[in-house]
Amino acid sequence: MEVPGYSDLEKIGRGNFGMVYKGIAQKDEKWYAIKQLYQSPNGINKIEPLMALQKSGHDHIVMFNPGFDHDRLWLVMDFFPLGNMNDFLLQPQNIIHTRLFMTQIADAVYFLHREGIEHGDLKPDNIMVSGTAQNPIAKVADFGLAKACRHSFFESWRSKWYWSPEVFKRFNSLYTKESDIYSMGAMFAAMVDRTTVR
Ligand SMILES: Nc1ncnc2c1ncn2[C@@H]1O[C@H](COP(=O)(O)OP(=O)(O)OP(=O)(O)O)[C@@H](O)[C@H]1O
Ligand SMILES: [Mg+2]
């Protein structure tokens, strides 16, 4: 895959909504993560409301810039070398960060909801870890993407662990602020229990 303006592209993972690469931007020679989306019709229009958040921003959400080329939609975001919370919190030395992460995640979800955006896919894999291993910062990623993407159900069993009963019943066709709260509670329970679904 080629993305104009980025070099050294390397695949780092795959999720429900697309393939994730890391690459170096020509503009500043820094690493970025680039998610190529399995786009739904009008996907770009559905990304637009999410872009409105860029104005205010928030310390605990991962913002992205969309790019569009030959029918492909991708999102460029900061690259987080510490990975996601699933990997991070399962390391024995990192248990002390659980409560801090909960506060930061709750703050981010409160912000998204106040801005009228449901996340729709809250799970530990979608909480990126920024900062340093000693002073980590949780950042909520991938909010609102379910509405802009053709769902692959690639790893959806992992997401399902965090789905509310009503979302489960309708197979991810509808999510709400209430179902986000359910997912957040399930995620907090997994954090306290130090379990994960892998
Ligand atoms: N900005 C980023 N920096 C570093 N790694 C990332 C970044 N974004 C995603 N990743 C990694 O890429 C992999 C795939 O992420 P992706 O979001 O596609 O899948 P997922 O979170 O498991 O599922 P979903 O599609 O439901 O969000 C994960 O291991 C994730 O940690
Ligand atoms: Mg994700």
Image: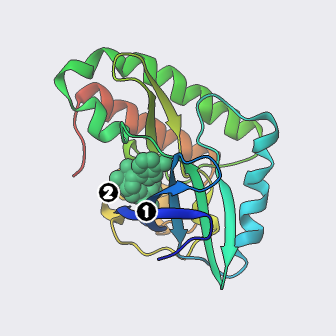
Considering only order in the chain, which callout, 2 or 1, is on the residue closer to the N terminus? Answer: 1
Give the crowd class for mark 1: few <14, some 14-19, many >=20 residues within 10 Å. few
Marker count (numbered): 2
Amino acid marked by disc 2: Arg
Residue 23 is situated, as x and y percent measured from the top left of the image, at 47, 58
Q: On the rendered structure, is 125 left or right of 119?
A: left
Quickly name the residue at label 1: 8
- Residue drawn at (53%, 45%) of the image: 30
Residue 3 is situated, as x and y percent measured from the top left of the image, at 57, 71
Looking at the picture, the colour scheme in use is rainbow
Kindly tell me whether mark 2's CB lies below 8 Å from ligand 1. Answer: yes
Ligand 2 visible in quadrant: bottom left
Res 93 quadrant in image: top left
Res 11 quadrant in image: bottom left
- Residue drawn at (62%, 70%) of the image: 4
Quickly name the residue at label 2: 158
* Residue reaching furthest to the left: 92
Q: Nearer the viewer, mark 1 or mark 2?
A: 1
Q: On the rendered structure, is 44 left or right of 195?
A: right
- Residue drawn at (73%, 35%) of the image: 57
Residue 123 is situated, as x and y percent measured from the top left of the image, at 41, 46
Query: Height in image: 72 above or below 104?
Result: below
